[in-house]
Amino acid sequence: MILLNQILQGALLGGYYALVACGLSFMFSVMRVINLAHGSLAVLAGYALYVLADRFGLSPFTGMLIVAPGMAALGWALQRFVLERASRAGLLAPVLATFGLSIVIDNLMFERFGADTRSLAPFVDDLAYASWALTDDIAIGKLALMTFAAAVIVLGGIQLFLTRTSYGRAIRATAEDADTVGLIGVNPRVANALAAAIALASVSLAGLFLGLRATFDPYSGGAQLIFAFEATVIGGAGSLWGTLIGGIVLGVAQSLGALISPQGFFLLGHGVFLAVLFARLAFDDFGARVRSALAGGRA
Amino acid sequence: MSLLALVNVQARHGLLQAVRGVSLSLEKGETLALVGANGAGKTTLLRAIAGAHKLSGGSISLGGVDVGAKPSYARAALGIALTPEGRKLFSRMTVEENLLLAKAAGRSGAFDIDAIMAIFPNLKARRKSLAGSLSGGEQQATAIGRALMTNPDVLLLDEVSLGLAPIVVERLYGQLEALKGSGLAIILVEQDLKRAMAAATRIACMLEGEIVLEGRAGELTREAIMRAYFGLRSSGRAA
């Protein structure tokens, strides 16, 4: 029964990881950019929601009406003024640019908010700890279930957007061949900026649920980035449903690890990530590309 | 006023000047065949017209509007469509999605999905297939269909018969024949001289980035074109 509970709680935790990974996975699959500022941006959204709640009495959910469009605008600007320029200098430059950006964001937040930890939980009554008892041994947290549902809706929504709308098709085509889309009337710069805006709007959701379920401080972004990255890689970089599965696998692995030993929570999570990473490098076509790139580099 | 007018167009690949001062004009309903050896600058010229290759000199105007400095997506919106060499389909998207993408040009006209399917009946069964899984002929039909979906005034076709079986090429040119009646102006690059002469109303032969021979299809002899093609300079500019 304990085992079943751990698996269930782990799967729900996985929903949170999938939500955190959504923006990272989307940016990587569509724009081929690994956004190392992903975690810091999620924490920034968390602080924005905190300020709106603390100063202006807006519930974090109402605050999202302001923060999500704000983050989308930030994503648009990030693409037009940073990533677009950086990507002209090769594949590595955008990664370095986002790394630098994460340091700037972290330290600006530290200067403004100090080292105190904050949480959004006090602004939502008992949502952070309320639960439904399924049996005597198993209870499901309301917030955990809500997070999971949000992950399914957001990942599914973006997937539908990409396949069913003209903007979504333009974004996918730009990802595949940015030169050719111009020939049929798509402005690739607009398509990429729109993709970045959507990615960062989803990052604001990650900030919301981070703040609701736990505490955060200006340097919390790094850990969020690692979990997001692990979920993305386990699920197969570039597939949104894969990201959901990757998040669940990571969450379940961590929960089962915690059953073995308290340190096992992180240990087994990282272990599964590494196992999947090496398996991919060894067996699937992503690995084949990496291997041929390495072989080409040596030759 | 010509539909499309090129004046002294120049384009480079780094130090190499691929197109050297090309001037030509195209009227509504005309089909111009661009012939010439490999490396003569035909593909670069088409890409320069479509905005996929930057001009290093000269001007291009469409219906009297200077488009030389506009990016490719803006030229598509004004009515220039290119079927690029090598097709360049979006291989992870379906045939239908490839076609629908071209609506981004924002032009209305006779060509929609149903019209494309009527022109290329071989695509009907493959509508929901990934473009990467198609046969060469189906891919080429999709690439031409995608360009037509922008409802262009000028259609640029770069080596549409490359790598296709003769029977497929035959059908493709039959389908192009049907398009000509609609007033569409076409510039096509074709390696097969006989086919180019049959399909076009005018022929222009390029050599080392310049147009060395130009004339109406009926008035140029095969021998004159061959001489210009290989750079045997006994013939001048005809017509």
Image: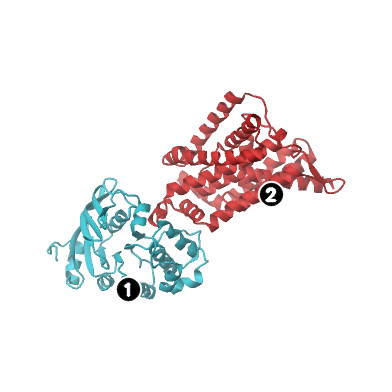
Determine if residue B189 is in view.
no
Name the residue: 75% across, 35% down: A263
Neighbor class of circle 1 (other Cα within 10 Å; few <14, some 14-19, many 20+) is some
Q: Colour of chain A?
A: red
Using the numbered discs, state the Cα–Cα distance from disc 1 to disc 2 in whole angstroms.
55 Å
Determine if residue B212 is in view.
yes
Chain name for mark 1: B
From this view, report whether residue B133 is shown above or below residue B48: below
Name the residue beneath numbered marker 2: A149
**On residue B85, which mark appears?**
none
How far from the left and from the top, in percent, is residue A268?
A: 72, 41
From this view, report whether residue B121 is shown above or below residue B150: below
Name the residue beneath numbered marker 1: B177
Name the residue: 45% across, 67% down: B113
Q: Secondary structure at mark 2?
A: helix
How far from the left and from the top, in percent, is residue A109?
A: 58, 28
Q: Which chain is assigned cyan?
A: B
Tally of marks: 2
**Quarter of the image where one finds residue A89:** top left
Q: Secondary structure at mark 1?
A: helix
